[in-house]
Amino acid sequence: MAQKVFVVEGRQFRTESDYACAMRDKEIIDKLRKETDSGDRTQLEELRKSLRSRKYHFRTLLGQDFLDEVEMQLKKLPVTVGRDKKTGWIRNRKQTSQHGQDRNTANKSRIERSEGGKAAKESRTAKTARTEKDEQELNKIVQDELGKREKRRRLTILLCSVGALCCLGYFAVYSYYDYRTRSAYERMNTLKDKSSMGTASSASGVQEDTGEPLFTLDGGAEAKEVLEEYRNLCIRYKKLIGWVKIDNTQIDYPVMQTTDNEYYLDHNMEQKYDKNGTIFMDKDCDVLKPSTNYILYGHHMKNGKMFGGLDLYKDKSYYDEHPYISFDTIYEKGTWQIMYVFRSKVYKEDEIVFKYYQFIDANGEMEFDSYMQEMAEMSLYDTGVTARYGDQLLTLSTCDYQETDGRFVVVAKKIPGE
């Protein structure tokens, strides 16, 4: 589409803002023309003086054009005062003779033609100079704009390069932590598998005597023997408390426990910093007692690791395909059947509401049944599985980003004899 052009006093303007400025200048010029007698030299000279001193502020080149117009008009006016060469007296044009008048008229015509041609030439020269000046100013503006664009381009490239380096650095650090964590899990699985093979050999009567005593915990009547498959792991990983696994998912991790529930949010099982953290049991749970409810926490990783895939249980179809959880403490094995799936959050201490993360031990059947009713009402769907006082529970908890401090929770009960 062709660009719109505005014309004022013979000059073209490309933008509406320039056109508005030109119309303002034209109003001032029209007013000055009306107030000034074009045949009065004194008024014209006074106007020229005002224009040259920039008494009137013009925003476009129409002001310069008007100044040129005034100067040309002054050049066209005849000299009205002169001196008589014979008498030496000053006289005006009316005092000359008719012959003198005719001669002056002829001379005036020649002068006017000469001055007119000279003025026209000067006008053309002035316009040419103005055109060249305009072109120089336009070229300067274009060069300045190109310079600014080049600076912006270089700055953009620099910022993109820095961003790319930061992303590469983040990816390198993430890859390092991921590799280190996977290696640690592989070592743990290897130790666990070797221990399991040792158990099988012992059952067949061919296990070698390593000379190592059975790994037990002191505590009188509460002393328990660590399962064979976890003995080597417990010797190396002092904070190991169990292992959680859901078949055909990424959830297959050791479970740690310490007195600080914040520690394993950014440390792995080897007590090294790792933003992925590791799966850990609530500090108030007791596997020796045992507690009514074991609560396990893990990050909701976007890549599905840790408890990143736990929220898939929001769909009943996923539950139907994965209804069981395998969770062993280091003292006993267990299979757990999922009962409830719900969303919750971390509440303020003074809020009177069911807080699943505080349900670790039930003080009696009434309290236990109350907790079960609360979770059943919060559950996203009915699994048909219930629990009664005396059953042992397992709770898996991870972050839920649908609300601030949100949590996604899966609760299961232990299948007796498993």
Image (tube, helix red, strand yellow):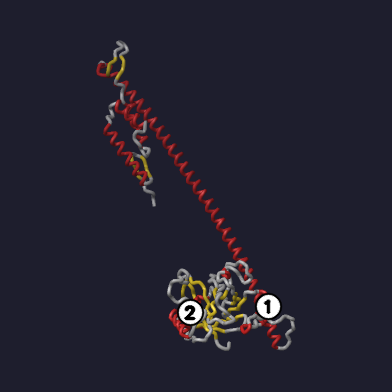
Observer-nearest residue: 229 or 174? Answer: 229
Residue type highlighted by circle 1: Asn
Numbered label attached to residue 71: none
Question: Does residue 132 lie above or below 381 as drawn?
Answer: above
**Quarter of the image where one finds residue 270:** bottom right
For residue 54, above or below residue 353? above
SS category of the residue bearing label 1: helix
Q: Secondary structure at mark 2?
A: strand
Check disc 2: other Cα within 10 Å, few if <14, some if 14-19, many if 20+: many
Residue marked by disc 1? 232
Closer to the N terminus: mark 2 or mark 1?
1
Query: Type of residue at label 2?
Result: Val
Residue at left offset 64%, top offset 74%: 238
Q: Which mark is residue 341?
A: 2
Percent across and percent down for residue 147 are 50, 46
Q: Quadrant of the rendered structure where residue 295 is?
A: bottom right
**Mark 2 or 1, closer to the camera:** 1
Cα distance in 3D space between marks 2 and 1: 35 Å
- Judge whether 269 appears above or below 43 on screen: below
Pinpoint residue 161: horizontal percent, then vertical percent. Answer: 56, 56
Image quadrant containing the C terminus: bottom right
The answer to whether one can see residue 90 in this image is: yes
Instruction: State whether residue 322 appears in this view.
Output: no
Direction from residue 98 to residue 3 in the image, left or right? right
Residue 232: x %, y % from top left: 68, 78
